[in-house]
Image (cartoon, grey):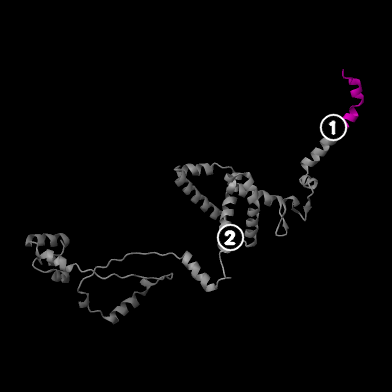
C-alpha cells in the first residue's frame, strides 16, 4: 500500500523534480531562437541562418529560403515522390539565387496572367468548364493563394533565366536590341481597301496645281498625331466591263429600263438611256 504520509513529507522534493522540466519546456516553447540555439545555430547580425541547411555560393541558406524551395519543389515535382522532391530542392535554391542575382522579379500581374492560361489549359485537358475550375481557385484561403502566386512567379522567373542563358557570344548591340524589341512588340493592323475602277481613268485630266492647293488647304484633315509606318500591296485591276457590256446587250429594252430604274430610280438622265452602251452610261454616272 502507498504510504501517503511519506509522500506528503517528500512533496517539496517531488514538486521540485516535476517543476524543472516544465520550466525548461516553457522557456524553449516561448523563446523564438531557443530551438536554433539548442541545434547549434544562432542569430547572426539579425538574420536567422541555419548551418544545417548548408551553403550556396559561399552564403548560408536560411531556414525560410529552404522552406520556400521545398514548397516550390513540392508543387512542381510532387507527382514524382518525396525523394525526388528532396533532390530538386537544391536546384530550386540555385534558381532562386540566380533570379535574385539578375534582379528577375516577376510581377503579380504576370503571375495572374499565367494562372488564367493554366485554368484555360486545364479546362481543355479535363473537359471541365473553366468557370468550375475558377471556383476552385477562388475558394482558396489567403495562404494557399499566396503559395500559388509564389509558384507562378518562380516559374516565370525560371523561364526568363533560361532565355537569359540562351544569349551567346556576349552582349548584343543597342541597335540589335531595338530591332528585337520591335519585332516582339510591334502591332500590325491590316485592312483591305476596295476601289471602284473603270477603263476610263486615263481620260481624267488632273490639274496638279489644283491638287496641291486642295491638300494644302485641307492639311488639318490629314495630320496624324502619332507616327505610323504603312505598307501596302496592290493587285491588278479586274475589268468586268466587257462582260457587263455583253450581258447588257442581251437584255430586252424593257429589262434594261427596269434595271436602270432599280439602280438609279431618282436620276432620269440615266433611266432614259435605254439604248446607251455601258461606256456611255458610265459617263452619266
Span of residues in magenta: 1-17
Left or right of 122: which side holds 1?
right
Q: Can residue 54 be seen in the rendering of this structure?
A: yes
The disc label shown at residue 146, or none:
none
Residue 119 image offset from top left, x and y in percent: 49, 47
Helix, strand, or loop for circle 1? Answer: helix
Q: Residue 222: within the magenta?
A: no
Q: Residues within 10 Å of mark 2 (few under 14, many from 20)?
A: some
Q: Which residue is mark 1?
A: 18
Left or right of 39: which side holds 229?
left
Image height of 22 relative to 150, above or below: above
Asked where in the image residue 167 lies, by quadrant, the reply is: bottom right
User: Given the current orientation, which residue lies at the most extreme top position?
Assistant: 1
Q: Residues within 10 Å of mark 1 (few under 14, many from 20)?
A: few
Q: Residue 7: within the magenta?
A: yes
The disc label shown at residue 161, or none:
2
Give 20 or 197, whichever is nearer the viewer. Answer: 20
Most common SS among magenta residues: helix
Amino acid at each position: 500500500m502507498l504510504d501517503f504520509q511519506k509522500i506528503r513529507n517528500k512533496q517539496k522534493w517531488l514538486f521540485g523534480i516535476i517543476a524543472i522540466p516544465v520550466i525548461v519546456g516553457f522557456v524553449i516553447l516561448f523563446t523564438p531562437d531557443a530551438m536554433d540555439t539548442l541545434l547549434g545555430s544562432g542569430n547572426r547580425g539579425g538574420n536567422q541562418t541555419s548551418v544545417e541547411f548548408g551553403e550556396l555560393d559561399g552564403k548560408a541558406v536560411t531556414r525560410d529560403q529552404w522552406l520556400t524551395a521545398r514548397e516550390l519543389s513540392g508543387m512542381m515535382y510532387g507527382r514524382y515522390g518525396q525523394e525526388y522532391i528532396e533532390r530538386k530542392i537544391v536546384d530550386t535554391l540555385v534558381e532562386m539565387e540566380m533570379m535574385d542575382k539578375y534582379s528577375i522579379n516577376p510581377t503579380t500581374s504576370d503571375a495572374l496572367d499565367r494562372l488564367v492560361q493554366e485554368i484555360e489549359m486545364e479546362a481543355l485537358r479535363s473537359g471541365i468548364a473553366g468557370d468550375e475550375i475558377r471556383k476552385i481557385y477562388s475558394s482558396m484561403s489567403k495562404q494557399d493563394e499566396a503559395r500559388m502566386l509564389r509558384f507562378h512567379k518562380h516559374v516565370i522567373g525560371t523561364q526568363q533565366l533560361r532565355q537569359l542563358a540562351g544569349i551567346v557570344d556576349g552582349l548584343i548591340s543597342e541597335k540589335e536590341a531595338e530591332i528585337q524589341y520591335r519585332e516582339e512588340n510591334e502591332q500590325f493592323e491590316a485592312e483591305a481597301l476596295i476601289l471602284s475602277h473603270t477603263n476610263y481613268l486615263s481620260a481624267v485630266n488632273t490639274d496638279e496645281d489644283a491638287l496641291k492647293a486642295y491638300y494644302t488647304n485641307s492639311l488639318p484633315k490629314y495630320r496624324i498625331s502619332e507616327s505610323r509606318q504603312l505598307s501596302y500591296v496592290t493587285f491588278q485591276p479586274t475589268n468586268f466591263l466587257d462582260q457587263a457590256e455583253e450581258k447588257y446587250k442581251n437584255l430586252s429594252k424593257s429589262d434594261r429600263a427596269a434595271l436602270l430604274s432599280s439602280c438609279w430610280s431618282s436620276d432620269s438622265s440615266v433611266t432614259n438611256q435605254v439604248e446607251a452602251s455601258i461606256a456611255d452610261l458610265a459617263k452619266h454616272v
